[in-house]
Amino acid sequence: MSALSGREEQLDWERRRAPLAAAGAIAGALLPMGGALVGAQTLTDQPKDSASRLLYFHEHASDLVVYAILLALGALAILAPMAYLYRATRFRRPALPKIALIVLILGGVLLAIVQVGSQVVLTDRAGDFARTGDQTYEEAKRVFDLPGLRTLAVGGLIAQLSLGFAFVMISLNAMRAGLLTRFMGYLGIIVGVLFVLPLAPGPPVVQSFWLGALAVLLLGRWPSGVPPAWREGREVPWPTRQELIERAQREGRGPASEPEPATAGAAPAPRTRAASSKKRTRKKRR
């Protein structure tokens, strides 16, 4: 009875929190895309030398701050759906380690701080460089080599590693518990890998697509139906390939059976024209 009561409480919690988690997933999909587009539009024409770049950053300070804020809000937004998915998965699959939730929160908060903090520091130093500096290459290099910016860069790397680990662990275990389809599970793992090893600069298309699809799933609008694990409140693993083959054979959808060998007394097969032709040829040779 206690197990049944706990399951009902968990399912009730999931029903109440699903809209909030879906809203976070939508925000986590749209905000980084918007930030990336603002950043791409602003940074496309930036000069290559350090001094000119600092002057360029000073001229476009407001756009760059907006860019950083959108990315920071996007990093915070993904905490809601991923923490929700973590709790739903861990209830059904206790093998999911608690460290996944810890590094998820650490990575999201730290990434938001790094995004805003680095841009604020760089904007402030760029303003000083433009107003009072000698605007030389050596002075510009000192700005980019500030200990504060280096510390924030290390923090950004830690945040990426943390989020990547969290996405991989939560997506993998959610798929094994039956909460995510195999497609969604493997794609979530790819999103985690891309946090650490991005393929190319630009909008996080794969991450935004996955979060948008997760929002559809959490709202119960999945095209093929919500996986049974969500309704039953327990782990419902996906069938293996061998199990699918056996099920198809039981339902009569397996491969066609081999023809049975001919039994004794069965009528012999009629001779073909080719066989008769060969026999006539042998008679003529005689």
Image (cartoon, grey):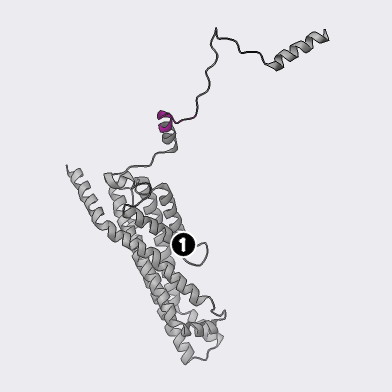
Q: Is residue 110 visible?
A: no
Residue at 27% x, 49% y: name it: 91
- What residue would you read off at disc 1? 205
Q: Answer with left or right where residue 279 lies relative to residue 192.
A: right
Count of residue discs: 1
> Which x, y percent locates residue 29?
39, 63
Name the quarter where the C terminus is drawn. top right
Q: Answer with left or right where residue 169 lies relative to residue 91.
A: right
* Residue 253 belongs to the span the image colors magenta: yes
Under mark 1, the amino acid is Val
Residue 269, placed above or below residue 132: above
Q: Which of 109 and 152 is in front in this view?
A: 109
Residue at 45% x, 87% y: name it: 127
Residue 261, placed above or below residue 115: above
Q: Quadrant of residue 116?
A: bottom left
Name the quarter where the N terminus is drawn. top left
Q: Residue furthest left?
A: 1
Q: Which of 236 and 117 is in front in this view?
A: 236
Few, some or many C-alpha atoms within 10 Å of disc 1 (few <14, some 14-19, many ≥20)? few
> Which x, y percent locates residue 210?
41, 57
Residue stretch rendered in magenta on the structure: 247-255
